[in-house]
């Protein structure tokens, strides 16, 4: 199993550009989520999904869109990048929303918006 | 008040020392608690779950105090390889989402 994979590892954007961060998992997990991590702020939940076709907003959803057309994939779209979106983005998955299963993280995407 | 609070550190300790971290949480309805470890520029990884009765995994001991709403992590006989950021995680109430603390940085010195 590859676990949770993310691409790209690094990205530099100009203000106003759009892009998609890719996330995939091969563990057949229902629950997937996106976090951003900023110094002194901890990991903050952007969006999450409890299964294919179902998504919901987390703590900091503004400026981001998600979709979940398959169990495996959960891409994060930045609609119009802003410098405030400079951050490290982690995708994560676990078996289901309920329960206490381990949550696995991808290796992260380091995004800089100029 | 933050939902999960940790002392950011850094904790600088010599090899072989015992070090303890505390974490407080605000939601008394929280049901599950974890410690994650995050190495520099890497993703967080589960270190251990925290059970009401306390639990131990080798040199690591985790404890939960529901009355005072805090969890703790004790590391005995610190190794250089223990240097990392330790994230306190609380599973919040009805939503069952993971709430992360900002992390405590541990640096073990030779």
Image (cartoon, coloured by chain):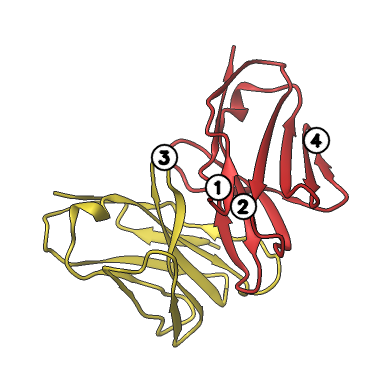
Chain colours: A yellow, B red
Residue at which label 2 appears: B89
Circles 1 and 3 on the same subunit: yes
User: In the rendered view, would you say A21 is above or below B14?
Assistant: below
Question: Label 4: which residue?
Answer: B58
Residue at image coords 39%, 41%: A39
- Whether residue A7 is situated above or below residue B61 in the rendered picture: below
Give the residue at mark 3: B41
**Disc 3 versus disc 2: nearer the observer:** 2
Q: CA distance from mark 4 to mark 1?
A: 24 Å
Give the percent coordinates (x, y) of residue B4. 58, 50
Residue furthest right as drawn: B53
Query: Mark 2: which secondary structure?
Result: strand
- The subunit carrying tag 3 is B
Look at mark 1 in the image and give the residue it sits on.
B101
Chain at tag 4: B
Estimate the x, y position of residue A53 in percent, counting from the top left. 44, 88
Tags 3 and 2 in contact by the CB under 8 Å rule? no
Q: Residues within 10 Å of mark 4 (few under 14, many from 20)?
A: few
Task: Give the residue drawn at x 84%, y 46%.
Answer: B54
Reading the chain from its start, which is encountered first: label 4 or label 2? Answer: 4
Quarter containing the C terminus of chain B: top right
Q: Secondary structure at mark 1?
A: loop
């Amino acid at each position: 199993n590859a676990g949770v994979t993310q691409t790209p590892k690094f990205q530099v954007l100009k203000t106003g550009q759009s892009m998609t961060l890719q996330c995939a998992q091969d563990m057949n997990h229902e629950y997937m989520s996106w976090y951003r991590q900023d110094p002194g702020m901890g990991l903050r939940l952007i969006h999450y999904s409890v299964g294919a076709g179902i998504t919901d907003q987390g703590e900091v959803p503004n400026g981001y869109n998600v979709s979940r057309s398959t169990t495996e994939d959960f891409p994060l779209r930045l609609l119009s990048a802003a410098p405030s979106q400079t951050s490290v983005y982690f995708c994560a998955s676990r078996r289901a929303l309920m329960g206490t299963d381990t949550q696995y993280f991808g290796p992260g995407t380091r995004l800089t918006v100029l | 008040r933050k939902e999960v609070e940790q002392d950011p550190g850094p904790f600088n300790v010599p090899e072989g020392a015992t070090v303890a971290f505390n974490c407080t949480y605000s939601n008394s309805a929280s049901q599950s608690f974890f410690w994650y470890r995050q190495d520099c520029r890497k993703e967080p990884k589960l270190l251990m779950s925290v059970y009401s009765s306390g639990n131990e995994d080798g040199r690591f001991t985790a404890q939960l105090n529901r009355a005072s709403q805090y969890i703790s992590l004790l590391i005995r006989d610190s190794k250089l390889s223990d240097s990392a950021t330790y994230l306190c995680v609380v599973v919040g109430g009805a939503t069952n989402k993971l709430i992360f603390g900002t992390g405590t940085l541990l640096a073990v010195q030779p």
